[in-house]
Amino acid sequence: IAGITQAPTSQILAAGRRMTLRCTQDMRHNAMYWYRQDLGLGLRLIHYSNTAGTTGKGEVPDGYSVSRANTDDFPLTLASAVPSQTSVYFCASSARGGEDTQYFGPGTRLTVL
Amino acid sequence: GQNIDQPTEMTATEGAIVQINCTYQTSGFNGLFWYQQHAGEAPTFLSYNVLDGLEEKGRFSSFLSRSKGYSYLLLKELQMKDSASYLCAVRDSNYQLIWGAGTKLIIKP
């Protein structure tokens, strides 16, 4: 079934540890996005990529990095996790970038202690 | 700054009609989206409006007034499975999506 997969589903992490959240899509979409969702707040964009080989910063990029080596994969790395990064992380993709509808992966629930 | 406002929570009765409002102030406008999100799940696309007026899709309709910075999502013949959060998002002049915090809709039998 075509779509977006994320791994892990959930994770508990000690503060200061490095963590990579994985995102893979098989729809051949050009654009991919990482959001975090916190209670009482709207989805906030962390980083995005309009096409393989390019990335850009969103609203809340500090403490996160991304890479886009190919069309399908868009990993999000927390270099040194802090408790304020406890959140639900969603990866999304769209066919042609900002002009198109975004489709979301199932999310990763991350707890930093 | 950019702002999307939606009611935090609404309650409605099975079989009834409910209207969820969204007002926005953004730097530019390139369309408005509604998504549905069940608890613990990913947001799923419901509707898209870029021109003024009503877009109907089955039991769901979405309305847009660009001059008023206003949209609503209308859900008819409510079913228990419609219990979810409904997210309003506006695409700004940079083609980034600005999201509201969502409206939690509770359906009672």
Image: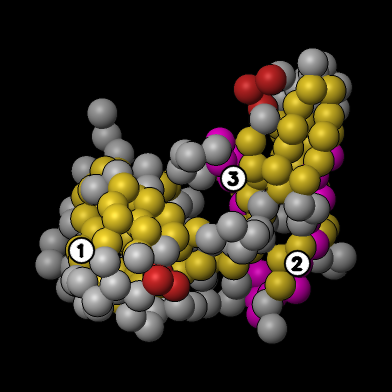
* Residue of label 1: A20
Residue A113 in view (yes/no): yes
Circle on res. B35: 3
In the rendered structure, the residue with mark 1 lies on which chain? Answer: A
> In this image, A23 relative to B74: left or right?
left
Q: Is residue B27 above or below residue B43?
A: below
Residue name at image x 67 percent, y 30 percent: B83
- In the rendered image, residue A53, in percent from the top left (x then y), is placed at 18, 73
Q: Is residue B33 above or below residue B10?
A: below
For image coordinates 23% across by 48% down, the residue present is A7
The chain to which mark 2 is attached is B
Question: Which residue occupies the foreground of this view, A10 or B93?
Answer: A10
* Image height of A111 relative to A62, above or below: above
Residue under numbered circle 2: B24
For label 1, the crowd category at 10 Å Cα-Cα, with few meaning under 14, some 14 to 19 and many 20 or more, is some
Task: Find residue A55 and report its horizontal and vertical position in percent.
Answer: 28, 76
The quadrant the N terminus of chain A occupies is top left
